[in-house]
Amino acid sequence: MRLRNFKRRDFTMRQKKSLVLMARGFLLLLLLPALAFANLEGKTEMDKDALMKKVSGLQMPFIENQGQIKDKSVRFYANTFAGTVFITDKGEIVYSLVKTEAGTENTEHRQEKSEDRIQNAEDRQTNTKAVVLRETLECPEETGIRGVNKSVTMVNYFIGSKDNWRTNIPTWQEVSLGEVYEGIELKLKAYGNNVEKLFTVYPGGTSEDIKLKMEGAKGIKVNKSGELEIETALGTVKMTKPVAYQETGGEKKYIQVAYNVLAGSGTYGFEIGEYDQTKPLVIDPLLASTFIGGGSGDYAKSLAVDSSGDVFVAGYTGSPDYPTTESAYDTTLDANADVFISKFDSNLSILVSSTFIGGSGSDHFYALAVDSSGDVFVAGGTHSYDYPTTVGAYDTVNSGKGDVFVSKLDSDLSILVSSTFIGGSTYDSAYTLAIDSAGDVFVAGETDSTDYPTTEGAYDTSKNGSFYSDVFVSKLDSNLSSLVASTFIGEGRYDSSVHDDLALAVDSSGGVFVAGGTGSSDYPTTVGAYDTVYNGKSDVFVSKLDGDLSSLVLSTFIGGSDFDDAFALTIDSSGDVFVAGQTYSSDYPTTEGAYDTSKNGNGDVFVSKLDSDLSSLLASTFIGGSYSDYVDALAIDSSGDVFVAGDTWSYDYPTTEGAYDTTYNDTTVGDYDVFVSKLDNNLSSLLASTFIGGSYSDYAETLAIDFSGNVFIAGYTYSSDYPITEGAYDTTDNGYYDVFVSKLDSDLSAGVTDISVSPASHDFGRVPKETTSPPAIFTISNTGGEDLVIGGVYLTGPNPYQFRIRNDNCSGQTLASSGSCTIEAVYRPTKTGTMYAEIGIGSNDPDTPTLYIELTGTGVKEHEDHEEH
């Protein structure tokens, strides 16, 4: 019963949302056409688009103005690929967005000096060559503009005579405008094609004070998606829908927030819901996560980690601009749907290699595996008669309307080592693939072909049923030159479960296990199996064939009275067999002491454990919430713990304390969030469980665990605010559906290095003006398992100049696991009143790249403090 197809195919075109950080921020998206790369000579439009996507997420440093710009009002500026953002000494933010007409040289724009950019851009507005937007804060405090988090990059200008040269100009990762309103700090970051404003509302600050006037625009309005649209002479510029949250007890609490446009004034602010005004607002990123994709749909279906820790992800795409790499096997999309294979480093920061593979028809990928030599095998189904095959392959001719393909590439994805078809005269597709210890390749899938190739002596050489697909299992040698064995298995009533969700595994003895769902009451079972009686509308089957596919060694049903389907299967080091899927049966069999013995919603995840003989149900549990939950992937780590991943419609899908994300993220009814859950080997305890997702639908398709126990998941997302991490290969959503790849630690807490501080804050109390307080000492520790690399230590917040870092033993240090260092700070007020600041500590902790220590103190008159004591 293909119930799950409806979920997979029920996609609705929606206006997508982008990630916004407020009150640590919101983004100005520079979405004007042809603003950048318009004159990349010798480049195709595809080249330009691909290049733009690759650089759009890069962080750009702010350059300090030390006279290289003659306009002395400019304090800092950053060059993005869509224009330049300037920060003036009055706290103005000026965006100079230059548009070069396609096909024109426009050397005037490229050669103009930096110091003339603002004025020249304004002068050119009547020619629609550029647009200048100037944001000013209404009624701000006197700002203390300064660079924050100094970059290692230095800039040199050698323009004109030597007197005008400027060398070793510092650059900064952020610029703080200081306390722009009482208790409110504003910071800016620049990226490849956007600028991010980061507001922090500290205790005592009032968010309603924030008012920004947009000059140079024809008008501003809030669209239906909650974005701020700015109409200009060149088109529409958008600020993404704002998001606000605070961190309380290690958990994020989201705050309602929306733009508030003052009619006719060109001014906007924010409407913010209730929040804890004793705490600032914070941002918490994922360990490692990246987008990858092009302008059309991109769908990841399988993932593997090799012995070096590199991550391979594969799927299919309709995007001609899906990123490929130089020297890859195929850098051109050949049809409306091609297979892609991409290789990342273990941090997901580098696209090591990436290739297409396909023919002139549609090619759909479903399975990937990496052998002990690092070669990459992929399998799926193709409608392309010219899908690439290799000399000496088992079958170089597409035999029917759609054939299985199996292809082998080298680890660099530069060479198609071998490639073959397998199929009959109608439709055939492989959905799962495994490699045994001898290097032989097993594929399983479904076929409509009565003449699908089988081999002499195989378990079943005849297709079962006339109107439904049958399961096949086929074995090829490692060179894909010989069909070593091939068999049908089933009774022909949708025995392949749901389209693309058959599961296959090979045990240490070479036995071949296959699992799925069947509507056949006479699906073959074996004497002594756990369950030989068909239970309901659709049952799980688990079957074991010998390595030659000549004998059905073991076979059993598992199920209840409603629909049950298996989507994933794996075998642990003891030979026990784990299967996971979805059930609609409230009487699906569970075992005493299991984590959850009661069905929770419409369709629940199940995880079941059988002994190696398939004769006993050792453990079985539900996992789920009030609505529908789907599992797609299953893996077991070296400790025997069981990980499952999928997607859920249940806002109350179970999560655990300390997990990366315990809050369901979708904002639209019917959308899905990714989940990852970890159970013990006996399925009695939910050790860890987390959501991952953005505002719209996110689907996890595959899961793998590396040798360090880190958990990788991949799938596809409709959410432009799916969580990604700083330094990832691609931090910008590229199109319709994008591939995502995410990495979490084994506790699903998103941190393999873990920075902590004690104490987390300090109140210096009442200190007379011009007097230095006793010092506060903060201990920075690495409570994770990997080295913690500490970058800069700096003061930020509304009143940083009232506090001092007196001794810093942490900057530039590398702390091993359990290592620590100290920072000493003092408070020396120059005025009266309560003041706030933070010590910022940058590090490679992926879930807390910048740790903040809160400082408070109250300045008093010299005699006032004595009088009160």
Image (cartoon, rainbow, N blue to C red):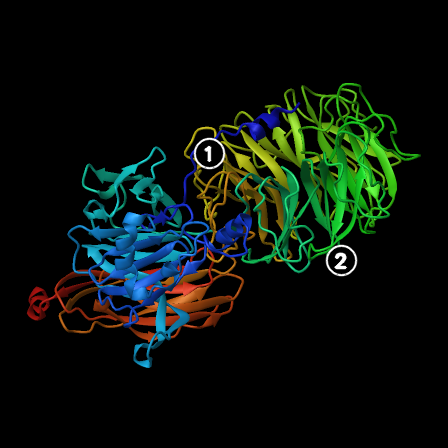
Image quarter in which the C terminus is found = bottom left
Q: Is residue 473 left or right of residue 5?
A: right
Q: Is residue 757 left or right of residue 311?
A: left
Tell me if I can see residue 787 in this picture: yes
Determine whether the residue tagged by mark 2 lies in a helix, strand or loop.
loop
Question: Which amino acid, mark 2?
Answer: Ser
Q: Which mark is residue 373?
A: 2
User: Residue 611's spot in the image, x, y percent?
Assistant: 74, 39
In the image, residue 572 above or below residue 117: above
Q: Nearer the viewer, mark 1 or mark 2?
A: 2
Question: Which amino acid, mark 1?
Answer: Asp
Residues at marks 1 and 2 touching, judged by CB atoms closer than 8 Å:
no
Q: Which mark is residue 342?
A: none
Q: Place residue 839 in its image quadrant.
A: bottom left
Q: Residue at x 35, y 48 (%)?
A: 28
Q: Place residue 265 in its image quadrant.
A: top left
Residue linked to disc 1: 652
Q: How many numbered marks are there?
A: 2
Q: Residue at x 79, y 30 (%)?
A: 400
State the CA–CA distance, disc 1 to disc 2. 43 Å
Q: Is residue 204 left or right of residue 709?
A: left
Determine whether the residue tagged by mark 1 lies in a helix, strand or loop.
loop
User: Residue 7's spot in the image, x, y percent?
Assistant: 56, 28
